[in-house]
Amino acid sequence: MVAGLGCATVQPFVPSTAQQARFDEVVREVEARISDGPPAAAALLSDAKSDWLYAQHLPKYPERARDVAAKAQHDAETALMMVRRNHAQSLAATDVGVVARAQQ
């Protein structure tokens, strides 16, 4: 008989208020600009949102959950960078077109 052995309690991953707020902020900004972005940004954001939720439902594997959450944050921020870059390129192309027409 084995005595004195108990189950180790593992604290599940719970994002901090700041982590959750940052993720939500990035998601909102991407969603607001997604019509200006490439389809890859929409797919990346969808994966990020799914991963973020999944990370919060891995109570037995908190380290894995943290890794998944970090990847989700990174993917959301990459999607944001993609839509911002696409928006900036659209503005630059518009500006070039306006200048070209003005010079004619």
Image: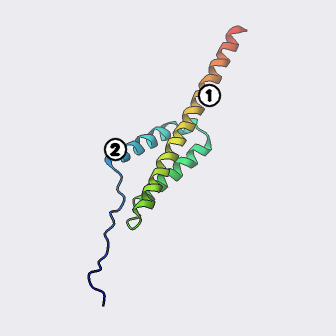
Image position, residue 99 (x, y; %): 66, 13
Mark 1 Cα within 10 Å, few/some/many (few <14, many 20+)?
Answer: few
1 or 2: tag closer to the N-terminus: 2
**Circle 1: residue type:** Gln
Q: Where 30 sits versus 92, above or below?
A: below
**Circle 2: residue type:** Ala
Who is closer to the viewer here, 90 or 21? 21
Q: Where 76 sits versus 52, above or below?
A: above
Q: CA distance from mark 1 to mark 2?
A: 31 Å
Helix, strand or loop status at disc 2: helix
Image position, residue 77 (x, y; %): 50, 41
Residue mark closest to the camera, 1 vs 2: 2
Residue 89 image label: 1
Image position, residue 46 (x, y; %): 52, 51
Residue 58 image label: none
> Which residue in the rendered view is the most extreme toward the bottom?
1
Horizontal side of 20 relative to 39 (left or right) equals: left
Instruction: Look at mark 2 in the image and give the residue it sits on.
Output: 18
Residue drawn at x 42%, y 60% as measured from the top left: 63
Horizontal side of 31 relative to 95 (left or right) equals: left
Residue drawn at x 53%, y 53% as measured from the top left: 47
Q: Where 94 sits versus 11, above or below?
A: above
Who is closer to the viewer here, 47 or 1? 1
Residue drawn at x 34%, y 56% as measured from the top left: 14
Answer with the quarter of the image where residue 25 lies.
top left
> Which residue in the rendered view is the most extreme toward the left?
4
Helix, strand or loop status at disc 1: helix
Image position, residue 23 (x, y; %): 42, 45
Q: Where 94 sits versus 4, above or below?
A: above
